[in-house]
Image (cartoon, rainbow, N blue to C red):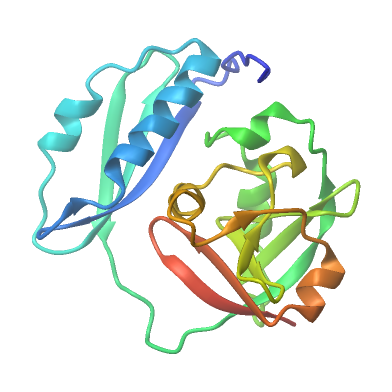
Amino acid sequence: MESPLRPPADPGFRLIETMLWTPEGGFQRGSTHLKRLAHAAGRLGITPVGVESVLSAFTADGPARVRLTVDAKGQAEITSGAYTPFPEGTVWRLAIADTRLDAANPWLGVKTTQRQLYDTDRASLPADVDELIYLNSGGNVCEGTITNIFADLGQGLITPPISDGLLPGVLRSTMICAGQARIGHVTLDDLKSAAALYVGNSLRGLIPARLV
């Protein structure tokens, strides 16, 4: 059973969903984002208000990165900016973070503004690194600062289980349900020996990657 959570006293606390919107297709994986939001809100005892109305009212001239937030009182709000896809052939360079995560920390499983470690590490990435990958205290791979990780160990893509300490990413969930990835523990040695590595999220999709 998942641990219940209580919103912190921080007035800036928010639940977060970041989505891709296009004029042709609307919100990509929108229903899955809303399911994750509802699940996190339930764990925190929050009743979202106005989510559907703010989303249905959104429009833009072209593809947009849309950030939906819900505060501790349940009030929904969106902000947005233009979305620019990565150039063809982009490969992200991965490094292993110094900090080890506690897989039992219940905050790892909900996407909120309670992510100071991730934000700080992402803001201070070295020039030759595009993403940091966290391990937990047991040595298993967890996730990146803004991505889940997928490794091809010879039998298709594998992605770490939630129990190892990570966010249930929307892209990750979609790929698992579609049979495009399976769940399994991943170690640092696995990352080093993998036939192929990817990181990804719902906004960007799968991004080819390599350890540096």
Q: Position of residue 144 (x, y in %)?
A: 64, 58
Residue 15 relative to residue 102: left or right: left
Please tell me which residue is depicted at 19% across the width and 36% down the height of the picture.
Answer: 55
Residue at screen point 57% across, 66% down: 199
Question: Which of the 4 quarters of the picture holds residue 6?
Answer: top right
Q: Is residue 79 visible?
A: yes
Closest to the observer: 206 or 144? Answer: 206
Q: How many marks?
A: 0
Above or below 187: residue 52: above
User: Quick one: which residue is furthest to the bottom in this view?
Assistant: 89
**x 56%, y 16%: residue:** 7
Q: Position of residue 191 (x, y in %)?
A: 76, 72
In the image, 59 versus 199, the foreground residue is: 199
Give percent across and percent down for residue 78.
27, 38
Using residue 137 as the reference point, say whether residue 151 is left or right of it: left
The N terminus lies in quadrant? top right
- The quadrant in which residue 17 appears is top left
The correct choice, above or below, for 53 with respect to 197 in the image is above
Residue 70 versus residue 93 in the image, above or below:
above
